[in-house]
Image (tube, helix red, strand yellow):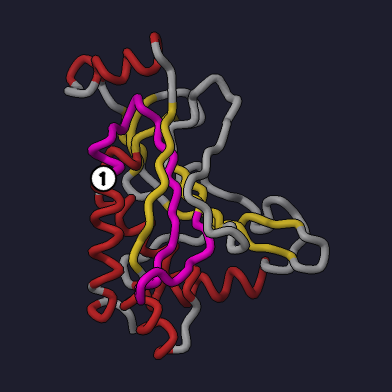
Amino acid sequence: MKFHPINLNKWARAPYYNHYMQHVRCTFSMTAELDLTTLLTEVRARGIKLYPVLIHMLATVVNRHQAFRTWLDDEGRLGYWEQVWPAYTVFHEEDQTFSSIWTPYEESFPAFYESYQHDTRTYGNVRKLAAKPDEPPHTFPVSSITWVNFTSFNLNIHNEGLFLRPIFTMGQYAEHNGATRLPLSIQLHHAVCDGYHAGLLYRELQERADQCREWLP
């Protein structure tokens, strides 16, 4: 996957990047609910799994915007990837552990869903933290805490504040006043994203959920 280095001397966001990397290095997290009423109805009617549907929604929105694909490569260079892929967790009921699996992103949900099914069948029972080998450097993490309908969630990453990738954590969905809502926590690095970008994520994810009949098979 092609990585495009960013020239800080020509990047409009350079003052913000320098401030939040050199002076006030920080990430921020936010939790909001997505209304899945229509989406869940359509998913159940089609007999498909909700988790890969949500993963594909996240990957679709992330890949629309350069800000969410901007991070440091293995050499420490700042830039953005042409495309990024989701690396998601799967739970092992037998011993209460989990593994991470990555699947290449496809704009077509049926194509992605087929690859997801292949990967989970092949690696879903592998008892390793990284169940699928050779994870590429252009993946972003997705996880699901299906046991808790939380109202907030925060990760504390101790790596000198250099992890610029977006991080997504889903909670347990629940019904409120006739609507099915799912809590979704996002964690972003302030050097590359602001509150505007968080709002953009939630708005486009909600639009994707509401328009699911247009892209679900």
The residue depicted at 64 percent of the width and 58 percent of the height is 132
Work out which residue is located at the far top of the displayed protein and give it: 23
Element on which disc 1 rests: helix
Q: Position of residue 148 (x, y in %)?
A: 59, 58
What's the amino acid at mark 1?
Answer: Gly
Work out which residue is located at the far front of the displayed protein and give it: 177
Q: Position of residue 14 (x, y in %)?
A: 25, 18
User: Which quadrant of the figure contains the C terminus?
Assistant: bottom left
Image-based side of 26 in relation to 35, left or right? right
Q: Quadrant of residue 23?
A: top left
178 and 194: which one is in front? 178
152 and 110: which one is in front? 152
The residue depicted at 43 percent of the width and 37 percent of the height is 29
The residue depicted at 66 percent of the width and 71 percent of the height is 122
Q: Position of residue 11 (x, y in %)?
A: 20, 23
Count numbered badges in the picture: 1
67 and 184: which one is in front? 184
Q: Quadrant of residue 72?
A: top left
Work out which residue is located at the far right of the displayed protein and give it: 95
179 and 110: which one is in front? 179
Q: Is residue 42 above or below residue 91?
A: below
The residue depicted at 68 percent of the width and 63 percent of the height is 91
Q: Is residue 181 magenta?
A: yes
Q: Is residue 3 magenta?
A: no
Q: Is residue 40 above or below residue 162?
A: below
What's drawn in magenta, residue-wise? 170-199
Q: Position of residue 146 (x, y in %)?
A: 58, 63
Q: Is residue 89 above or below residue 31?
A: below
Q: Is residue 50 above or below residue 196?
A: below
Tag 1: Cα neighbours inside 10 Å, few (<14), some, or many (≥20)? few
Give the residue pinned by disc 1. Answer: 199
